[in-house]
Image (cartoon, rainbow, N blue to C red):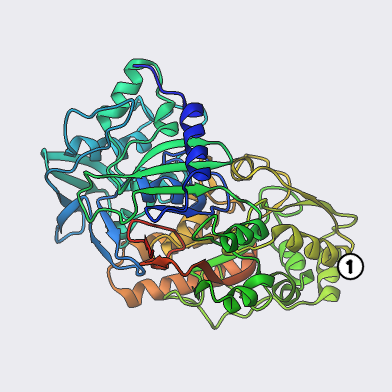
Amino acid sequence: MKPFSTRLLAASAFALMSAGALQAQTLVYCSEGSPEGFDPAPYTSGTTFDASAHPVYNRLVQFKPGTTQVQPALAESWEVSDDGLEYTFHLRSGVKFHTTQTFTPSRELTAEDVIFSFERQGKADNPFHNYVSGLSYEYYSSMEMDSLIKEIRKVDDHTVKFVLNRPEAPFIANLAMPFASIASKEYADTLMAAGHPEDFNNIPVGTGPFKFVAYQKDAVIRYQRNEDYWGDAAKVENLIFAITPDAAVRLQKLKAGECHIMPYPAPADIQGIKADSNLTMMEAPGLNVGYLAYNTQQAPFDNANVRKALNMAMNKQAIIDAVFQGSGVVAKNPIPPTMWSYNDAIEDDPYDPEAAKKLLDEAGVKNLSMKIWAMPVQRPYMPNARRTAELIQSDFDKVGVKVEIVSYEWGEYLKKSMEEGRDGAVILGWTGDNGDPDNFLSVLLSCASADSGGANRAFWCNEEFSDLLAKAKAASDLAERTKLYEQAQVIFKDQAPWATLDHSTVFMPMSNKVKGYVMSALGDHTFDGVELAE
């Protein structure tokens, strides 16, 4: 089997954009950036999940739109053993994988596909574990799935059992996350036999509401409605992602009718959008945090007092005023205030340049030069990382710390920021995937997530902190879990692996023609329930 030319199909996607993209049956979404790939498992970026996990794939379970409530998806039901160590899922019958120009499935979804989708992430000897050189599975590793899952057993074609080594309170919710998307083992085997395993990441095949058609890098992605979808069919026939990194250009396209929905407007444009009678603006508090992650393995940032000094040198309210312009609040904790277990008793490090200078002097730090990494894209937790970095640069200069601002293309930025020995502090952030504090604290800050393949960009490993998280995950009582997470936040604040920057409000502008769009509580973007009024 020879792979088709993505260039040719991409050209057809552009033709569609110019020759009828605004037809009622075609929805155009002005995406803020390019996906790293179309396999959801190796990545953590919401930009990538919007383009892969949500249109193309499904999970065993899913979140009810607009909530963090778990409901059936590819599994129509499940049972949990009394000891919390066995989860048995009953798969839907008749679920079909996509038929594309290059692949026609010979069978429907079975337990084999579920087992494959997890074992390829957790087992280094699986042929599809490293089907593209350099792949890592940040979510799987950071959430310690490799040590959590003892085995995954096929009971029969439509029944699969997960056996765990320990209880895990958020386990079901975790399976609704994009990394747990169910892929076709048959498709993977076909590509491997043909010598083109990389197409698994380039030409995705799933069970989702839309089929992938074409991608022209950094320009446009085209999808088509899956007419064989097991759930409610998508309302529109065609879905197009028009990749538009600049927020001002996205808004121009929206006003001109060249796209119907856009994410992450510039804060300065929000009032104007609200006043435009042709547009609708949705908004909601974001389940997010923006942060500056120090490399705690690199001197002098291995000293908590140095990190706290830098945090005290930073005028975070000025950042909120200049960058967010009313759409964000200063963060003091690594989880947002809308999340259960948020420890409001914690006091933030004050803005105090003189105290910062004193702490740096006491630590013997003089003539410090450092890099601050600024993201190249807008995210809900950070509308303008470059401007934020400039403000931090100015603040640090006042305490004698010289800053060089660096950036990279988004995919490269995410990859390089987790490389061992990384030089500099990284501006990044997080939007919750499942409404559980563990999704922030373990994924971003545990010892497990500090290793290669994890998402702990501070490379911070505090055993006491991680032990509290482990106890919280194993506990079934919510009050007990809350207490443990509150204690963990105290350690985090004392040790300061990050400067916590902000929690933002999320805004979603769209044409008045758009009907049925539901804002996600988790910051992702899905379009299968959306239609366009004539």
The answer to whether residue 330 is visible is no
- Residue shown at the point (51%, 69%) measured from the top left: 335
| Of residues 365 and 79, the one drawn nearer to the viewer in this rendering | 79
Give the position of the C terminus as an image quadrant: bottom left
Where residue 485 appears, as percent x and y from the top left, is 44, 70
Where residue 404 appears, as percent x and y from the top left, is 82, 51
Crowding at dot 1, Cα within 10 Å, few <14 / some 14-19 / many 20+, comes out as some
Relative to residue 483, is residue 110 depicted above or below?
above
Q: Amino acid at mark 1?
A: Lys
Where residue 478 appears, as percent x and y from the top left, is 32, 74
> Residue pushed farthest left?
156
The image quadrant that residue 409 belongs to is top right
| Of residues 498 and 363, the one drawn nearer to the viewer in this rendering | 498
Give the position of the N terminus as an image quadrant: top left
The kind of secondary structure element at disc 1 is loop
- Residue shown at the point (53%, 71%) measured from the top left: 279
Q: Is residue 105 left or right of residue 499?
A: left
| Of residues 425 and 364, the one drawn nearer to the viewer in this rendering | 425
Q: Is residue 138 left or right of residue 504?
A: left
The answer to whether residue 373 is visible is yes
- Residue shown at the point (47%, 70%) measured from the top left: 512
Where residue 438 appears, as percent x and y from the top left, is 42, 62
Q: Is residue 198 left or right of residue 164?
A: right
What residue would you read off at disc 1?
Answer: 398
